Amino acid sequence: MDLRTDILPHSDRLFRMALNILMDATEAEDVVQDTMLRAWERRAEWESIENVQAWLTQICKNLALDRKKKMSRTESMNAQTTATLTTSPTGDTEGQLALLHQLIAELPPPLDDLVRLRDIEGFTYREIAEQLSLTEDQVRVYLHRARGRIRQRYEALQA
């Protein structure tokens, strides 16, 4: 396996995932850079890795979630929800998108990952099942539950 041909081509997808978790491009870039650094430090394991994309995705997701926890200590999520709702009229797509990303972030694992992988990243059910070690049926059921929770929370906030 080679860094240039097997690892670096995944950086764009990793960035999008980190951005969806963190909602901050600078932080997302830092997470992707940290992911690449971790991958390089663990290069002795490369030959034993079956799915490079899943491996990198897991590293990136963990780093982004850790960074998000640190960020949330300084910023209350409830205050952010209130600010988004009060400053964005219904026609404000950007504000509604930010709210949607926040509602996804509030989901417990693995529901948050399922929504991101399927609805944002466009992975197939089979790819998600492989990455999260679930069956395709479990992916469908959990995804249905996650979307229902998002819908419920969104409607409650809009009321």
Image (cartoon, grey):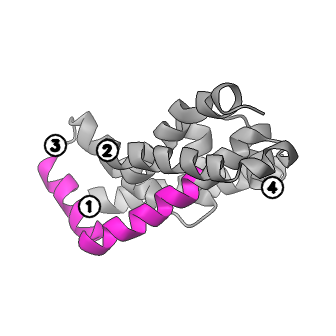
Mark with earlier residue (2, 1):
2
The percent coordinates of residue 149 (x first, y second) are: 51, 60
Determine the residue positioned at 52% across, 37% down.
Answer: 120
Given residues 47 and 135, the one toward you in this image is 47
Q: Residues within 10 Å of mark 3 (few under 14, many from 20)?
A: few
| Disc nearer the start of the sequence (1/3) | 1
Q: In the image, residue 90 lies at what x, y percent?
A: 22, 41
Task: State the residue at coordinates (51%, 43%).
Answer: 17
Identify which amino acid the numbered label 1 is placed on: Thr
Q: Residue at 16%, 43% (x, y): give it.
A: 89
Give the vertical position of 154 relative to 8 (above or below): below
Relative placement, left or right, of 127 versus 85 is right
Residue marked by disc 2: 26
51 to the left or right of 60 = right
First along the sequence among labels 2 and 4 = 2
Comparing labels 2 and 4, the label whose residue is closer to the camera? 2
Please name the amino acid that badge 3 sits on: Pro
Residue linked to disc 4:
133
Mark 1: few, some, or many residues within 10 Å (few <14, many ≥20)? some
- Relative depth, front residue between 76 and 24: 24
- What kind of residue is marked 2? Thr
Whole-number angstrom distance, CA of label 4 to CA of label 1: 32 Å
Toward the left, the furthest residue is: 87
Q: Secondary structure at mark 1?
A: helix
Disc 4 packing (10 Å; few <14; some 14–19; many ≥20):
few
Q: Earlier in the sequence, mark 4 or mark 3?
A: 3
Label 2: few (<14), some (14–19) or many (≥20) C-alpha neighbours in 10 Å: few
The residue tagged with tag 2: helix, strand or loop?
Answer: helix
Is 55 positioned to the left or the right of 96 in the image?
A: right
What quarter of the picture does the N terminus occupy?
top right
Please provide the residue range marked out in magenta. 60-88
